[in-house]
Amino acid sequence: MSGVIAVLGFGEAGSLLARDLVAAGASVRGYDPAVPAPAGVTGAGSDAEAASGAGLVLSVNSAKEALAALRDSLDALRPGAVWADLNTAAPAVKQQLAEIGRTRDIPVTDIAMMAPVPGKGLRVPMLASGEAAGQVAAQLTRYGADVEVLDGPAGLAATRKLLRSVFYKGMSASIVEALEAARAAGYEDWLREHIGEELAKADVTTVERIVTGTRQHAIRRGAEMGAAAQMLTDFGVEPIMADASRALHERLATEDS
């Protein structure tokens, strides 16, 4: 791969990755229509201009821009270039990117960043899958990146990230909603302490206990979450997560009946 790395998108993640690549000695060129290039990065006037002549392109703009960024850059990409998409997009989008790349013999690597980039920068844990994943990982690792290569197509890294997101972001949203309701009821401090205690005592047996208990008591817990959703409504808090929990318990009760 050519020594030039193109970074498309200078949002929170892209700007930090570009900064760390420059600090590690990489030659970086990049483009963002709304954000100036970070210090040490050669700014370009378009995605295509940034990608032109680069051996590795890191697309870190947004999931909704991922396809357009690749399509707009195809004519500018030189033979042997590799496209790596780091956006949090659905596996189907990653697969579509790979298909577009194959029309021009441009291998597309799917990269999932598995933790917040601030505070870690290029050392954020990443998963890589798809064509040239090993090649991309090897180049980024030389600059200090932490990349685990998965044996599978583009979309596999995204699948793993989003499966974890269903759990972690869902749990986070439920905690936020519960604390909003507790604040309205005057019990926020009590609930915050209780949540902390529950998280602190969780261990490897917690998952199986939750799954088994949820199915075993689905009918009762569905009714309980219906009551909780009504209570939140009375408090003036929209019960998005509570009502979703009610619906899931009711579905499980039907499946297991």
Image (cartoon, rainbow, N blue to C red):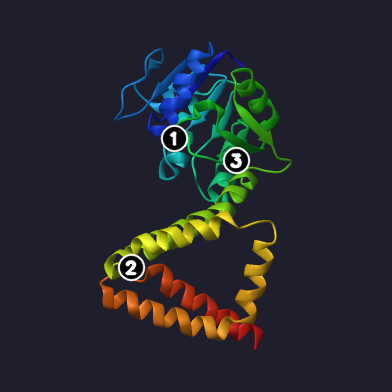
Q: Position of residue 79 (x, y in %)?
A: 60, 21
On screen, residue 194 above or below 47? below
Q: Which residue is mark 2?
A: 181
Toward which corner of the image does residue 205 lie, by quadrant?
bottom right
| Residue placed under numbered mark 1 in the picture | 69
Q: Position of residue 75 (x, y in %)?
A: 49, 26
Label 1 is placed on what type of residue?
Ala
Residues under numbered marks 1 and 3 in contact, where contact means CB atoms less than 8 Å apart: no
Give the residue type that dot 2 points to: Ala
- Quadrant (top left/top right/bottom left/bottom right) for the C terminus: bottom right
> Residues under labels 2 and 3: Cα distance?
45 Å
Query: Furthest-left residue in view?
Result: 236
Q: Is residue 109 visible?
A: no
Residue at the limit of the structure toward the bottom, as seen here: 257
Q: Is residue 176 at all visible to an observer of this figure?
A: yes
Residue at position x 61%, y 50% from top? 159
Q: Which residue is mark 3?
A: 98
Name the foreground residue: 183 vs 170.
183
**Relative to residue 88, is residue 51 depicted above or below?**
above
Point out residue 53 in the picture as x, y percentages from the top left corner: 51, 16
Mark 3 is surrounded, within 10 Å at the Cα level, by few (under 14), some (14 to 19) or many (20 or more) other residues, namely many
Sooner in the amino-acid sequence: mark 1 or mark 3: 1
Judging depth in this view, the residue of 165 and 105 nearest the camera is: 165
Crowd rating for badge 2 (residues with CA inside 10 Å; few <14, some 14–19, many 20+): many
Amino acid type assigned to the residue bearing label 3 in the image: Ala
